[in-house]
Amino acid sequence: MTTTTAPVGGPTVPQERRVVTEIPGPLSKEMWERKRAAVADGVGAVLPVFVSRAGGGIVEDVDGNALIDLGSGIAVTSVGNSAEAVVRRAGEQLGRFTHTCAMVTPYEGYVEVCEELARLTPGEHAKKSALFNSGAEAVENAVKIARYHTRRQAVVVFEHGYHGRTNLTMALTAKNMPYKHGFGPFAPEIHRVPVAYPYRWPTGPEHCAEEAAALAIERIVKEVGAENTAAILIEPLLGEGGFIEPAPGFLPRLAEFAREHGIVFIADEIQSGFCRTGSWFACDHEGVVPDLITTAKGIAGGLPLAAVTGRAEIMDSVHAGGLGGTYGGNPVACAAALGAIETMRGMDLNARARRIEEVMKPRLRGMAERFEVIGEVRGRGAMLAVELVRPGGTEPNPEATAAVVRHCHANGVLVLSCGTYGNVLRFLPPLVIGEDLLSEALDVLEEAFAGL
Ligand SMILES: *Cc1c(COP(=O)(O)O)cnc(C)c1O
């Protein structure tokens, strides 16, 4: 390229799909060879194109291809890449100071983010927060706090749950490959119980909530002991495990059981939070008020930030100095978070997420009628998915899933898969994506199914 200035991303990126080379193109392939030589093979890539800039609903690569983004870097850039308010606020902060360590000398941005978290998270009770760098770190700290507060050790998690890749969070995560395989031994006192997965519930979706809750509670009572249980930890809309919406009634029943037994109910909203499902948090849909909530991903427009927010009396039970970390609540990441939240409010991104559902769900349902390989369409807001099965049954179909992903990638649409069985296509567009791009991406997706 002969331009004298670096390409500018964010709002200035033209909002159009463009495929000018095969994908990945020659320059990306060259860089991939460099990556192979310098980067550990364990760090994979869903689509090995190297990005030059991104903004709105488009990710541009070094070969000049422009892909429609249905992934948001795994539900992170909900406000779009390099969103104006994120760049402005983080840029100003970069010029003032980059780091002091909040545990050494504090600064206002950290407090402001915690004030916003208290306002935005479910429940009207007094709340406090602590800030960290990654989702896994937030989950680890939520468990630390719950154990300290209850003086109990056991943590209950759910089938298909995902909570991160550190030692404790690997133990909390259900799926072996690729997250846990070969990385044991894992942390003890983790107990996994069934989740209300309507599509795969043996007696049918209508019985799912009640039966799954009864089964989970029985397992806690009989095998763990409610009085030994520090926390029940669940994603209110399960992410990596397959965008599973627990059958309505399941979450409120578990929250009630936790309350009756002095168990800390922790909602992991790292993927589902911050407008992703059409409300600030997925818990809001059923009016569930968790004791603690973990957030990350969408919180800061792409900068690394995470939080644990919860009842003041639980958060404050830990001794001074018991929580922290060198970078947790970094001032630039806090400024970015305030920019992201400003964008979410200013553009009403909850409404945008609901509109994305209105545009996408009917199209996906239409495809489900046309193509037998689609077993179910599900999700909320801009956290939508289709589960792929072998025609005539419910046996998972990861091969067809991979084939659809390949077609989309080759034609300039960035999609991700997920699920315990690798058979779920998930859609996580930036909430600022234009409707024309969204429709175009759905056209490509439909072609992919037609070509199976
Ligand atoms: C991504 C994710 C995590 C882990 O977050 P990292 O920032 O990758 O450590 C934890 N829980 C859920 C629900 C997630 O989606």
Image (tube, rainbow, N blue to C red):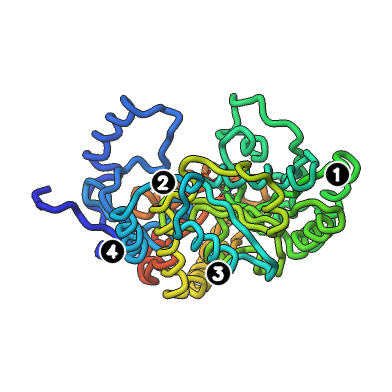
Examine the rendered structure and indicate whether residue 6 appears above or below residue 286.
Answer: above
Q: Earlier in the sequence, mark 4 or mark 3?
A: 4
| Marker disc for residue 239 | none
Q: Nearer the viewer, residue 85 or 162?
A: 85
| Residue 337 left/right relative to 384 | left
Secondary-structure class at tag 2: loop
Q: Amino acid at mark 4?
A: Glu
Label 4 environment density (alpha carbons within 10 Å; few <14, some 14–19, many ≥20): some
Residue denoted by label 4: 16
Give the label, 4 or 1, closer to the camera.
1
| Marker disc for residue 278 | 3
Residue at 62 percent of width and 39 percent of height: 169
Alpha carbon separation for disc pair 3 and 1: 33 Å
Secondary-structure class at tag 3: loop
Residue at 26 percent of width and 49 percent of height: 52
Examine the rendered structure and indicate whether residue 167 appears above or below residue 394.
Answer: above
Q: Which quadrant of the figure has residue 347?
A: bottom left
| Marker disc for residue 100 | 2
Alpha carbon separation for disc pair 2 and 3: 36 Å
Q: Earlier in the sequence, mark 4 or mark 1?
A: 4
Residue denoted by label 1: 219
Q: Earlier in the sequence, mark 2 or mark 3?
A: 2
Residue at 59 percent of width and 56 percent of height: 129
